[in-house]
Structure formats: C-alpha cells, structure tokens
Image: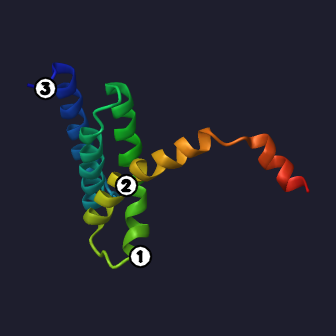
Amino acid sequence: MAEPSTTVVAVAATATVGTASLLLDVDANALIGAFAGATLFVLSAREVSIWMRLLYLIISLAVGYMLAPEITSNTFIQESGVAGFLGGLLCVTLSQPILKHAEGLDISNLIKGFKK
C-alpha cells in the first residue's frame, strides 16, 4: 500500500497536469506524455528520497514537454506524446551520469589548460 503522502502528491500532480492540458496553446499530448515519462522515471528511482523524486518529477515534466518539439523535428517520431514521454523519461536519466562525472572534475586544471 502506498504512503498517504505519496498518494496525495500523485493525485495533485495528475490534477495539475490535467488542468494545464486544458489551457490554450498547450500541447496536451506532449504534456501527458512528458508526465508519463517523468512518472515512470520517478517510480523506478527507489534509492533517492521522496523530496528528490518530487524534484525529479518536476524537472522531467518540464524538460520532457520542452523537448517534445525538438524530438519530433529531429527524429522519425511524429507524435508529440511519444516524444514527450521519451524526453521526460530520459532527461534526468541521461543527465545523472554527466553530473556524477562533473563532480570529480578539477576546474582549476581545466581553466589552466585553456589559458595556455
């Protein structure tokens, strides 16, 4: 059984996405696809806290929605819902290894290398 706080967050997020999809100039397919992709990622991220998962949900939803037109224009995918799903699912998934790698970089050596 899910925790009550998790259920409340899920219901609130679904209601927000549903309401936002009714607004003018919003691609409802891309928004719902991005929400589905973000939700799938968040549900599979068990090793992080609930607050980090909520933050990942918001980031994945926003970036997935913004990536949908780029994905449809630069790939064979034509449906904005599928593009939003892929964007929402992959944006945090692909950026996490990059962030972990960037944590180990020594910026001072990198700057010295550019000054030469």
Residue 78, x across and y down, in percent:
29, 76
Q: Quadrant of the N terminus?
A: top left
Separation of marks 2 and 3 at Cα, in angstroms? 25 Å
Q: How is the image coloured?
A: rainbow
User: Which quarter of the figure has residue 46?
Assistant: top left
Name the quadrant of the C terminus. Answer: bottom right
Q: Residue at x 24, y 39 (%)?
A: 43
Q: CA distance from mark 2 to mark 1?
A: 17 Å
Tell me the SS state at disc 2.
helix
**Amino acid type for the residue under numbered disc 3:** Ala
Q: Which residue is mark 2?
A: 90
Earlier in the chain: of badge 2 and badge 1, it is 1
- Tell whether label 1 touches label 3 (CB within 8 Å): no
Picture coordinates of residue 97, whole percent (x, y) = 48, 47
- Residue 67 in which image quadrant: bottom left
- On screen, residue 42 versus residue 107, left or right, reads left
Give the mark, 3 or 1, whose residue is nearer the N terminus. 3
Q: Residue furthest bottom?
A: 76
Q: Would you say 76 lies left or right of 116 here?
A: left
Q: Residue 94 versus residue 26: which sits nearer the camera?
A: 94
Locate residue 55, reporting x and y percent.
39, 34
Q: Residue at x 67, y 43 (%)?
A: 105
Other-residue count near label 1 (Cα within 10 Å), few / some / many at <14 / 14–19 / ≥20: few
Give the residue pinned by disc 1: 73
41 vs 62, left or right, is left
Q: Give how far apart the Cα atoms at labels 3 and 1 are.
A: 39 Å
Give the numbered dot on residue 2. Answer: 3
Q: Amino acid at mark 2?
A: Leu
Query: Which label lies toward us, 2 or 1?
Result: 2
